[in-house]
Image (tube, rainbow, N blue to C red):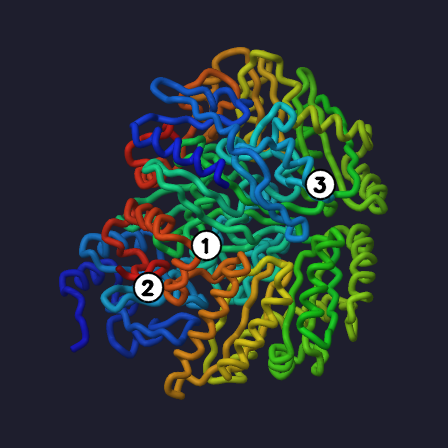
Amino acid sequence: MEPRPPDAFLNELASIFPAGRLLTRNAELMAYESDALTAYRVRPYAVVIPERQDEVIDAVRVCSKFKIPFVARGSGTGLSGGSLPAADGIVITMNRLNRILKVDAEERTAVVEAGVINLDVSKAAAPYGLYYAPDPSSQPICTIGGNIAFNSGGAHCLKYGTTSNHVLSIKAVLPDGELVQLGCDSLEGSGPDLIGLFVGSEGQLGIALEVTLRLMNRPEAFITVLASYNSLRSAGDTVARVVAAGLLPGAMEIMDRLAIQAAEASVHAGYPPDAAAVLIVELEGDRHQVDAEFNILRQVIETSQAQEIRVAQDENERMRIWKGRKSAFSAVGRLSPDYLVQDGVVPRGRLGEALEEIGQLSLKYGLRVANVFHAGDGNLHPLILFNGRSPGELELAEKLAGDILMMCIRHGGSITGEHGIGVEKRQYLPAMFNQRDIEVMQRLRKAFDPQEIANRGKVFLPA
Amino acid sequence: MNMANGRIERIQKMLEQNMRLLPRGGGTKSALSTPARDEKSLDMAGFSGMIEYIPEEFTFTAYAGTPLSEVVQILYEHGQYLPFDPPLVERGATLGGTVASGLSGSCRYRFGGVRDFILGVRFIDGRGELISAGGKVVKNVAGYDFPKLMVGSLGGLGIMVELSFKVFPRPQAYATWHRSFGSLEEALQIMKRASMAQIPLEALDLQVQNPGFTLWLRIGGLSSVLPFRISRLLEIIGEGHMLEDVDDEQYWDQVREFSWVPAGHSLVKVALTPKSIPALEAYLEGKPILRRYAAGGQAAWIALDDSPRLLDPELKDRGLSGLVIWGPPGFPRLGELRGTSFLRRVKVSLDPAFRFTEV
């Protein structure tokens, strides 16, 4: 028999949410069973669809009263199962809290609700020559609230950091229903950096409702270079040489053969189809500096065994190059019924080595692995292709993924650079931190949420 | 490591004996490192030295008591720098003290503050346990972000032992424009224009002269590009005087060391935005209080020959928060405190027996 929520709990939710915004029928709940990590599926008790901040607060308070787990969900683009429901819990969808409340061009800030889509912030800021810097590949869909929960990154984090570096203040509801205001409008603060702690806490310290984001001046000039290589290692080594030349590009990305072919088939980005790897380097800033940096970059790339070097001639060509890169995950998805995306980080100098090891693991397990990654950050995104219908293949893919994560730790890196631990990497957290380190995180969590109802079952393995 | 381990055990023993500890690095921020009431000063000088620095990775790990001057020198030799421009380098400030006080300097304007560059931390919590958090690579979201939480923690959440940071390549050359104004309005107008400019500025400070105001704009970059940036910046600010090479270096060294603050004065940092400057100036104008608005008006440094607590109600009225850097010991936070109930939960989980100072 399917678990049923207490009637009194559902009645209280029904007193907040009208029919149509409280979903309980199986057919309605199916869409919320998983996020972008589709290998995991859990059907929640119910889904509530708030349209106002006070409805989110009320929903959390009802959950707290009945000790029912909840997970806030934006657009469900998370790749670590971070918004996977609990079987005995509810999903609070945040998409309808999507108002951009203010764009302050002089202060260079935007005040938005948590359900606002990432790219919509930049669109609202564009008339003022401003933009919101963090740019996860899912930016046309993913929400700011989700970005905050997972401290999302993107291709352009090398210079200006991830979400955490762009959030000034947060109004949030804590797991017991208390409303708090963290941070202020200034880039500077006084006292412990509570914003820093909240961002990336994977929804376990509360739900962000309204946030003030920092906007940046849109660069005057971009130069986007695409270089192709006949080996992944040469592309990886070039990254280290670019950095060693003292350059700080806005982005440095690499895609391997499989990813290139998939992106080509999908969006016709114009990548050289026979290359073993392409390296994308983007310089940005004022015209004179970008031109001077390009001279340095050109020398580095020309002496790097690049087979072909292409420089985007206009904004259209630049956007086409980026479209290929940003659609790579979904494009690779077309090559295979299922895939797992990993998110490990290695020191930049170990990139070449790490990629070769991934290649060997791919052969060992007999599963194809496509590589698309933020090379400048050492942030790998191996996509492990498998067929979930073939018995045992998911387990095999997960084992391969685990081997990649352990390799990242061995190289002194991390198991996740921007996707979060979620449900997927819980078992690897103890490989990176010892028991004491993990216990102190859990104690912190319990100080906020003694019932452990906020995003239960994530980050930490259940006891 | 063995050296550090012995010292860590000694600290753990002190905590076991119910002692209340306040870490002290270089002692350059008297209001934050002078123990109050029953607190005992814990000298962090023994936790000093670079542990790991790989120039190609643009990251390093050092003991928390390492003097900034040592870090700055090592990075300089490899063409790198701390982009958050920590203050009080020559006076002897340490990495740990900089993180605990959450202080960044004028040149944080370009790429961000200390919070934006910290990667990892090892600290002793109130239970006496040695905790590692964050990592040593430039991107990492595994586990809660304790490294950032330690920024501004004032010694109240743990005793930092080791810290990891990312760094950037140092600009090849710098230059600074300065221009004086009779009215605040005019100075703020030009400051706004400069902040919207397409040329990235390293620093954008407004110095209050009594009478008058001076805007200081620093630019950096490749040597071959600097002349272009210098002339474009002049177009934006209209007119001004320029400092180059050694003059530029020396000027910002003095700013970094607070040479403009007379001995014996209290020093307060206020977090704000340019919009709050007129209201704050309306209160401060005509009073014997020195001030400088740094990093594009995101921080105010206020110096006075009086109790810094005088500013508390004024900041509260304006919805601003401050931190006493130099001054008498005691609770150093001024003005509006936000997120106090959130912070209380953090404090209870990391320091349940209140072994560390109030924060």
How many residues crowd mark 2 within 10 Å: few (<14), some (14–19), many (20+)?
many
Q: Chain of mark 2?
A: A
Residue A396 sits in which quadrant? bottom left
Label 1 close to label 3 by CB (< 8 Å): no
- Residue A243, position as x, y percentages in the image: 71, 55
Q: Can the viewer see residue A241 in this picture?
A: yes
Residue tagged by mark 2?
Answer: A49
Q: Which label number is shown at residue A3?
A: none
B277 and A397: which is toward the camera: A397
Mark 3 is on which residue type?
Leu
Which mark, residue A148? 1
Q: Answer above or below: position of B55 versus A139.
A: above
Identify the image quadrant of residue B22: top left
**Chain letter of disc 3?**
B
Looking at the image, the residue that sits furthest to the bottom is A390
Q: At 58% across and 73% down in the image, what residue appears? A: A371
In this view, the residue in front, A55 or B119, is B119
Quarter the N terminus of chain A occupies: bottom left
Query: What is the quadrant of the C terminus of chain A in the image?
Result: bottom left
* Chain of the residue where label 1 is placed in the rendered structure: A
